[in-house]
Image (cartoon, grey):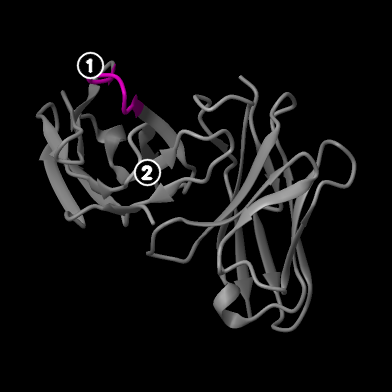
Amino acid sequence: AQTVTQSQPEMSVQEAETVTLSCTYDTSESDYYLFWYKQPPSRQMILVIRQEAYKQQNATENRFSVNFQKAAKSFSLKISDSQLGDAAMYFCAYRRKSSGDKLTFGTGTRLAVRP
Amino acid sequence: EPEVTQTPSHQVTQMGQEVILRCVPISNHLYFYWYRQILGQKVEFLVSFYNNEISEKSEIFDDQFSVERPDGSNFTLKIRSTKLEDSAMYFCASSESGSNQPQHFGDGTRLSIL
């Protein structure tokens, strides 16, 4: 079974600084997807970024980028120029490549942004 | 941008009562999901649904739970006899056909069992 581990329950960053959230996962699959979801206090689940395992290039979305290390099964999220609106719970998630397959989530990292 | 919509946003129910949570997935999506999140815990998969049948369900999804797509637009989750431990946030999600399509989540229904 696939597992996703987020070892940092809480993180804090100064506004305008950079922060990295860690995620590791375990799978026997060779091709799959990885995601970071943001959950603000309103408790919506907002897709931040995704990575396809067969792609060597790390995904980027504006201030958000990932460091995907397939051999190490590591998938960290870097937030640059942190903003107050980035404060939220961040969940790392895994999905096999099959159509319609479920997401497996980590336990989340709560990010606080200090003004 | 199309959204997944869930109703109600908050449901309060007495223990032992039946509850139905409703979702309207994005119109051209073919895969539908329910997840739940107990307060302070991670999001857990309950069930996925495709082509009018359950494709996969977790061990949480026992006989008390059922899903239905009654009219081609709504996707419902029914809990037949609610327990205190069913109190959680329930998220509906949907995705298009194709393995590279992400799941889009609704805003969730907060279910409180008294």
Residue projecting furthest to the right: B71
How many other residues sit within 10 Å of disc 1, few (<14), some (14-19) or many (≥20)? few
> In this orientation, does residue B89 appear?
yes
In three-dimensional space, the C-alpha distance between marks 2 and 1, rounded to whole angstroms, equals 19 Å
B56 vs A16, nearest the viewer: B56
A91 vs A12, nearest the viewer: A91
Q: Which residue is drawn at 16% across and 24% down?
A: A80
Q: Mark 1 lies on which chain?
A: A
Q: In this view, does A64 lie above or below B18?
A: above
B46 vs B24, nearest the viewer: B46
Q: Main secondary structure of the magenta part?
A: loop
User: Which residue position is annotated with label 2?
Assistant: A93
Residue type at mark 2 is Ala
On whether residue A53 falls in the magenta region, the answer is yes
Q: Which residue is drawn at 44% across and 39% down?
A: A96
Say whether residue B98 is left or right of residue A25: right
**Residue A32 coordinates in the image, percent (x, y):** 38, 34
Residue type at mark 1 is Gln
Q: Nearer the viewer, mark 2 or mark 1?
A: 1
How many other residues sit within 10 Å of disc 2, few (<14), some (14-19) or many (≥20)? many
On whether residue B77 falls in the magenta region, the answer is no
Q: Is residue A37 above or below residue A42?
A: above
**Residue B75 coordinates in the image, percent (x, y):** 76, 46
* Res. A63 image quadrant: top left
Range drawn in magenta: A50-60
Image quarter (top left, top right, bottom left or bottom right) of the N terminus of chain B: top right
Q: Residue at x 26, y 48 (%)?
A: A25
On residue A57, the disc is: 1
